[in-house]
Amino acid sequence: MTTIADGAGAGHVAWIVVFTNVASASCSIKGYPGAAVTDAPGQVVLNATRAQAGYMGGQYPSPATIVLAPGKTASTVLEWVDSPANGQTPVGANCPGMDGGKVLITPPNTTRSTAFAAPGDLCSQFEVHPLVVGGSGRM
């Protein structure tokens, strides 16, 4: 699993999360990955909301089963707002990522997460979109 910074616009920031089948046989994946932010001690302070549409991700169809041959990828877009929105107070010091926290990504229907350093600008409106075929995170 890898993450790729995917730009920003009007206070919105996005990452593409890419899942690659590293096995020697095909596998299937469907739905939304889990995504959460932890503080430095490891407590979850913010969970991503599942969303079929988003400012950075665009509009997505309903989740479908994706069959991945060995070496092939599926991906999703994680997006957030880089400042408190609609009167929301950010969790943590200023924003959840500012205190040395992590972003935890969990593939659908699994319980094992991979941790990435949390970006300092992850403040509010944290969303995850459905998985799609390929590495762009978009249809």
Image (tube, grey):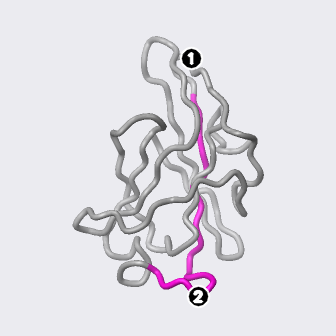
Q: Which residue is the extreme one toward the bottom?
A: 87
Q: Residue at x 65, y 67 (%)?
A: 8
In three-dimensional space, the C-alpha distance between marks 1 and 2, rounded to whole angstroms, equals 45 Å
Residue 116 higher or lower than 33, as above or below = below
Residue 52 has which mark? none
The residue at which mark 2 appears reads as 87
Question: Is 10 placed left or right of 79 in the picture?
Answer: right
Of 123 and 120, nearer the camera is 123
Indicate the quadrant where residue 13 lies: bottom right
> Which label sits in the foreground, 1 or 2?
2
Residue 69, numbered label: 1
Left or right relative to 120: residue 28: right
Q: Say which label, 1 or 2, has the lower sequence index.
A: 1
Q: Residues within 10 Å of mark 1 (few under 14, many from 20)?
A: some
Residue 59, how many percent across, how many down?
77, 51
Q: Is residue 98 left or right of residue 88?
A: left
Specify the amino acid type for callout 2: Gly
Q: What is the total number of numbered labels drawn onto the structure image? A: 2
**Extent of the magenta region:** 73-90
Q: For the residue marked with disc 1, what is the amino acid?
A: Ala
State left or right for residue 9 relative to residue 5. right
Q: Residue at x 47, y 43 (%)?
A: 2
Q: Residue at x 55, y 82 (%)?
A: 84
Q: x, y percentage for residue 3?
A: 50, 49
Classify mark 2: helix, strand or loop: loop
Say if the magenta span includes residue 89. Answer: yes
Check disc 2: other Cα within 10 Å, few if <14, some if 14-19, many if 20+.
few
